[in-house]
């Protein structure tokens, strides 16, 4: 269920900035929306948090380990003394606990399968309310945050580590697109690692800012028979190369990652 809040009662926008905003009060969307708006922000939040209620209704009957919201989405990997200058150590997974590409060589698949988390039953989107709150806290308040030090330095965040953040399911859920909008709003640099050609679709390209985003496409081989064997859920090499061409034409810095090598 959702309601409309007038500009006079909206807690997270300056009065007069927006005519109205949507407020959600479903079992998952309600607490998430409240968290997203717990820090006063100028970000024009138009996201449909109701998608999380749909997931809850479909899956959350006590059988989904960890629930239908992915919560451990930001992390510092290899952040020990010998790797402090590695920009790739700051990682963001927009979807977690699985990946539909199901690459046979995936280290994340190996780790999570062992604990019963891999695609059980599907990858779930991150806690968008918490993500929005983190950025609003750091860039629009003086409140404490464990992420303040790294975010204020604007260390580029690597998007896509334990799972692909641009799987085609995002056409339905639109969480990755919303994350890109938030990163753009706060002018935060990001490096997208993906095996998906979704990032080369027009509506996603329009969301990318050439001054903030780079896209690195992983391609194991141009032999799609081999690709189908080792990356059964991933798009063909031809589709990935077409996506890179579209991105490059739009002025986005691109690269091909040949991995595993």
Image (tube, grey):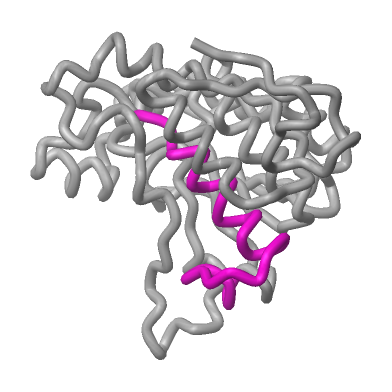
Residue 131 belongs to magenta span = yes
- Taking 20 as reference, is 183 above or below it? below
Outermost front residue: 8
User: What stretch of residues is rendered in magenta?
Assistant: 124-150
Outermost bottom residue: 81
Q: Position of residue 161 (x, y in %)?
A: 42, 50
The part of the image, by quadrant, that contains residue 245 is: top right
- Taking 249 as reference, is 132 above or below it? below
Residue beneath the point at 29% across and 44% down = 106
Q: Position of residue 13 (x, y in %)?
A: 77, 41
Residue 52 shows in the view: yes
In front: 45, or 232? Answer: 45
Residue 83 belongs to magenta span = no
The part of the image, by quadrant, that contains residue 15 is: top right
Q: Position of residue 26 (x, y in %)?
A: 42, 18
Drawn side of residue 55 relative to residue 105, left or right: right
In front: 194, or 5? Answer: 5
Q: Position of residue 162 (x, y in %)?
A: 36, 47
In front: 167, or 47? Answer: 47
Drawn side of residue 113 relative to residue 4, left or right: left
Residue 219 shows in the view: no
Residue beneath the point at 65% across and 71% down = 142
Residue beneath the point at 53% across and 76% down = 86
In front: 117, or 30? Answer: 30
- Taking 46 as reference, is 31 above or below it? below
Residue beneath the point at 16% across and 33% down = 65
- Taking 104 as reference, is 137 above or below it? below
- The number of callouts visible is 0
Drawn side of residue 219 relative to residue 151, left or right: left
């Amino acid at each position: 269920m959702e309601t409309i809040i007038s500009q006079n009662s909206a807690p997270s926008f300056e009065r007069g900035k927006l005519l109205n905003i949507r407020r959600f009060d479903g079992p998952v969307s309600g607490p998430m929306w409240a968290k997203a708006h717990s820090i006063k922000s100028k970000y024009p939040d138009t996201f449909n948090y109701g998608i999380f209620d749909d997931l809850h209704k479909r899956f959350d009957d006590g059988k989904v380990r960890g629930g239908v919201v992915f919560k451990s989405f930001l992390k510092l990997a290899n952040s020990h003394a010998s790797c402090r200058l590695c920009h790739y150590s700051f990682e963001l997974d927009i979807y977690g606990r699985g990946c539909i590409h199901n690459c046979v060589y995936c280290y994340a698949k190996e780790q999570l399968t062992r604990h019963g988390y891999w695609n059980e039953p599907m990858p779930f989107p991150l806690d968008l309310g918490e993500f929005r709150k983190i950025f609003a806290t750091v860039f629009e308040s003086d409140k404490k945050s464990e992420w303040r030090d790294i975010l204020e330095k604007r260390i580029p965040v690597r998007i896509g580590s334990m799972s692909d953040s641009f799987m085609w399911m995002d056409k339905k859920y639109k969480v990755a697109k919303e994350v890109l909008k938030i990163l753009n709003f706060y002018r935060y640099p990001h490096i997208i690692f993906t095996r998906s050609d979704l990032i080369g679709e027009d509506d996603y390209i329009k969301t990318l800012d050439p001054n903030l985003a780079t896209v690195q496409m992983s391609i194991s081989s141009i032999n799609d028979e081999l690709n189908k064997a080792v990356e059964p859920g991933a798009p063909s090499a031809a589709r990935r190369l077409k996506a890179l061409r579209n991105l490059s034409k739009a002025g986005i810095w691109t690269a091909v990652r040949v991995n595993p090598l």
